[in-house]
Amino acid sequence: MDINELIQKIVDKLDRIRDLVKQVQSKINGLLSHVPGFLHWVISKVEDLWNKFCDKMSEFWDWFTDKLAYAGDPFLLKDTGEKWNSKLGVPAHRRATEVDSDDLLVDDNWTGSAASAYKSKIGGQKDALNLVGRSYASGVSSALNTMKTGIWIFWIAIVSALVVATLAFIAGIGAEGTIIGIPAGLLAQISAVVGFLLAAGGATVALKFAADDSASSLRNLSNYSDKWPSFALS
């Protein structure tokens, strides 16, 4: 599954909710058209609840206005994080184990002040390679994984909240099978939308925390990482 398939699942659930809303409207209109005189008080009650329901549904659809366009891609983040380790971290670590004066041929084939100067810099090169492998590559990978997990949790929470809202809509439609039951059904559906909005708000806050943590980790990594030895750049 990729991010497009995940978003399509959410779109399908939204289409299902849209169909349920049409069913609610059709059912209520059909019942109210046959309200007997002694139950006219129900019409006023239903009108108030229907207006509240429409207001909440407006908030519901507004919430999705831009979210699906900026879904993020946890799968790409996971793949990128793994590549930071496999293509940079691990090779740098392997090179670090090879940069040792005992394994090099400097003291066998190269003598004099230049050879001594080079040998004195071997430790710096080894430390720099270890830093790339153990600190920098793994740090970037960890930050990307934090963001990946945050996006996953966000969308899982949204899907779960949509499932709960859908079930509540269906239950409400069942209650709306009678005139007396319409207010109870609408109240259940309004509560479902409110519940979704609260869950979505919590998921959004959690995602922001994950994004802030990931960005902070990358900034700290950049600020505290030692630069590549200057002698290796000349």
Image (cartoon, rainbow, N blue to C red):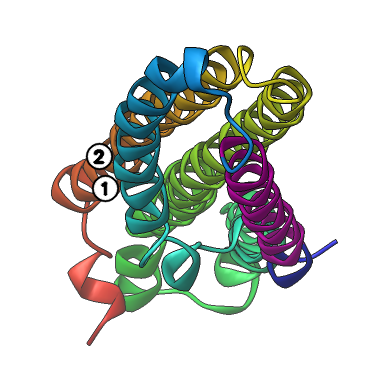
The residue indicated by pointer 1 is: 215
Give the extent of the magenta segment: 6-32
The quadrant in which residue 190 appears is: top left
Eyeballing the image, is 219 above or below 73? above
Binning the other alpha carbons within 10 Å of mark 2 as few (below 14), some (14 to 19) or many (20 upward) gives some
| Residue 51 percent across, percent down from the top left | 31, 39
Is 103 on the left-hand or right-hand side of 116? right
Q: Amino acid at mark 2?
A: Asp
Q: Residue at horizontal 58%, vertical 59%?
A: 77
Check if residue 67 falls in the magenta segment. Answer: no
Secondary structure beneath label 2: helix
| Residue 174 percent across, percent down from the top left | 78, 23
Q: Residue at horizontal 45%, vertical 73%?
A: 69
The residue indicated by pointer 2 is: 212
Is 13 on the left-hand or right-hand side of 151? right
- Estimate the spatial distance between the alpha carbons at disc 1 and disc 2, rounded to whole Å: 5 Å
